[in-house]
Image (cartoon, rainbow, N blue to C red):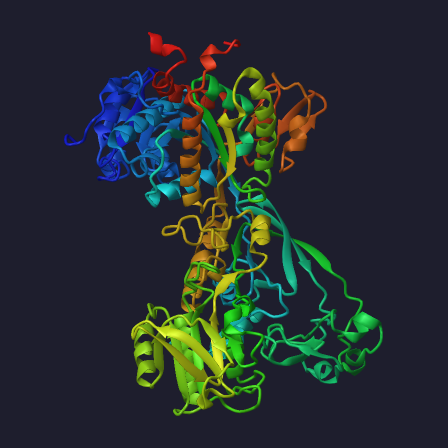
Amino acid sequence: MQELNVMPETQNVPMPGAAFEPAIVAFVCNWCTYTAADLAGTSRMVQSPNVRLVRMMCTGMVDPKYIIKALLGGADAVLISGCHPGDCHYINGNYKARRRVKLLMEILPRFGIDARRIKLTWVGASEGNEFAATVNRFAAEIKELGPIDTRNLPLL
Amino acid sequence: MPSGIGVYVCHCGTNIAGRVDSEGVARHAAGLKNVAVARDYKFMCSDPGQDMIIKDIREMGLTRVVVASCSPRLHEKTFQKACQRGGLNPFLFQMTCIREHCSWVVADPAEATAKAKTLVAAAVSRVNEHEELYSRVEAVHPDVLVVGGGIAGIQAALDIARSGHKVHLVERGPSIGGHMTQFDKTFPTLDCAACISTPKMVAVAQEPNINLMTMSEVVEVKGYVGNYTARIRTRPRYIDEDRCTGCGLCMEKCPKSVPSEFEEGLGKRKAVHRNSPQSVPNTPVIDPASCIYLVKGKCGACKQNCPSEAVDFEQQERFLDVQAGTIVLATGFDILDPTALSQYGFGRYPEVYTGLQFERLNNAVGPTGGKILMKNGQAPESVAIIHCVGSRDKNHHAYCSRVCCMYALKYDHLIKDKVGHHARVFNFYIDMRCFGKGYEEFYRRVQEEGVTFIRGRPSEVTDQSISVEEDGKLVVLAEDTLLGRPVRVAVDMVVLCTAMQPRRDASEVARIFGVSCGQDGFFLEEHPKLGPVSTATDGIFLAGTCQGPKDIPDAVAHASGGAGQALSLAARGQVSISPTVSWINPDICIGCKMCVGLCAYSAIEFDERRRVCVINEAMCKGCGSCAGHCPSGAAQVRHFNEKQVFAELEGLSQYVSPVRQPAGADAT
């Protein structure tokens, strides 16, 4: 693939003044949102490259510490996405995720992390277009919000 | 044993390599911690690609493998098997998707390559923490549960029963046969629907391996592949099936008449009724909503006249649990109610019919005895057939219902045949879709019979005439898009080719069986091309129109496919169950019992002696509700444990950290 414009290894380091490209980690359930992401891919729906998927079996297994870990690891935002209410492959795991994320959104601002950096969405297996739209919308929102400054937080 | 990870980056022809620099990704991976070898190849899933992995495992003693290619939902099992053939535990493998989630959706090659590198780094980091796991083998119960007794359910049940396996066939209505029994002729061969469906219905009734349960619904399903338990509710028929001889005297004597659902409201039925004399079982059913005895406590004409004392008003709802290894869903479709499309005047003008109503007008045992007659008893001189009513319409259903073009052609022929060649027939169509075997030929034949085709979706059906010729008729207003001009066509009768749509309770049924519905509301298949009869839930298969609109040949073929899939599990008699279930570390568990209440499958018990919670692995599905909540971190899902997820996040953050500009970094 010589003709491709291969990126030099150092390009990850931003130039001063370069446009902010957020890093977003997405915990998605295997049955709905991961499948929707596959469908969006098969349908060639161009998406913001900022989102990285972590496949979970169910949003119900997303321990809040995974979200905190991602944010402390430098992710500017975390997306959690699963099956629509009532459609959970495991009966009700998504309701458990909803409770946990709600609590987390109340706690994190007390530590200086904007609650808008966490988002919980429901994207069903057949909603490839919805997945692409969610990714693009969230990436745009985080671009607007700017980089996270977990490094300057007192708890580190 | 020396530790070493092998990383394999796929080109997928140009699907990945067209956007992502696969060679560069492999070079990058070679520099990652613990990576012994990193290679790229045109098609990793091909035999040479898999052999490359097997050879490296054997010769280089690889202890872990990462493949970066398509979605793991597609080829994870392929590569796990390759690892196994090489002598490596299949769970010491991690797959990352750089096609669906990367090369196909990231426009810029540099960004796509960067994303692929991150994803590979995360997978490499994660695979370090993988543990050997072993699948357990469980017996598959040999019986199969088929839900729905339309033509698809009948076909599936017969296929399975003839192999020697027992089938529980559950039908909600009083008789099997489904929509097909409402039809008169079937396209394109013009076979009589009853002649080809009733022998199958009788075969079901006579098949010793089929346990037919009518008036029944599945209300709850428990268990897992190979081992399902379904709770079935049977509503009372109020007539004892064993005693009833099907003589029909009760229907003669019943004084109460109500509009018939089977006749689509065109005819009447008694409170005690059956769809047709060919119903299977042919025992009539008493409708508790219209029966005078069941509503008011008086009458009992049927009971007094029944020669075999079969009428039993004391019958109650019954519940029965059946065991089955696999389940075939064949719950069928509903017809769109065209009242919502008020421009076509259905319900307002008596001579506007739905497709199914028109089927009944043609049927020999229908309300007109098979004659095409208007409400005034006259045969129509002219008929307009409006295609795509509710189909291919973004206000209703975006999809094509796939059968309307063909049954419209069938109606064209039947009108010409029954009313006479002088009857004029106008088809208002968008496109003619005659795709099946013999369909295009049938289209030709009908064209030659002198039927008129007007390309355009009508805007309105009205009784407002503007000329003497239109007086007393229905006028169809449309644009003939081939001539580019508006047309008014005055007719005696209008037939609406109404869309096929999901059953109104499809989402509820989906929930009971743990399958999902697609955007159109039909049950979602595992893969649109390569898994059209299986679902995301192991051991549950689809048959017929519950998966999407189908004509009879397609529904029957689909049903045989579903039956074949169910049989291959049942015949093998065993299934391997994924070991990716939860485990509670007894050394860490504090016995708070939080997980016990969270578990949706009641798979966690509290061990009083040790004061810890214990997972029942046979019941655990590995959803991780317990692991996501456990305050002490004792509950972990195997293959998705804390160490593994953390490692994956660390792999991702290797990329994340430098790209982000820390606050105040501008100064340095």
- Taking depth in this image into account, of B500 and B145 the one nearest to the observer is B500
Among all residues in the image, which is located at the extreme front? B466
- Taking depth in this image into account, of A144 and A105 the one nearest to the observer is A144
Q: Residue at x 51, y 27 (%)?
A: A116
Q: Position of residue B243 (x, y in %)?
A: 72, 74
User: Does any portion of residue A124 appear in the rendered image?
Assistant: yes
Q: Which picture quadrant has residue B297?
A: bottom right
Q: Position of residue B439 (x, y in %)?
A: 33, 73
Q: Residue at x 53, y 10 (%)?
A: A155
User: Does any portion of residue B245 appear in the rendered image?
Assistant: no
- Taking depth in this image into account, of B281 and A41 the one nearest to the observer is A41
Among all residues in the image, which is located at the extreme top? B668
Above or below for A9 versus B626: above
Q: Position of residue B463 (x, y in %)?
A: 51, 81
Q: Which picture quadrant has residue B276?
A: bottom right
Q: What is the tally of numbered marks visible in this picture? A: 0
Q: Quadrant of the N terminus of chain B?
A: top left
Among all residues in the image, which is located at the extreme left? A2
Q: Quadrant of the C terminus of chain B?
A: top left
Above or below for B111 versus B506: above
Above or below for B590 versus A59: above
Q: Which picture quadrant has residue B433?
A: bottom left
Q: Position of residue B578 (x, y in %)?
A: 48, 36
Q: Residue at x 39, y 10 (%)?
A: B664
Above or below for A31 versus B152: above
Is B604 left or right of B132, judged from the image as shown?
Answer: right
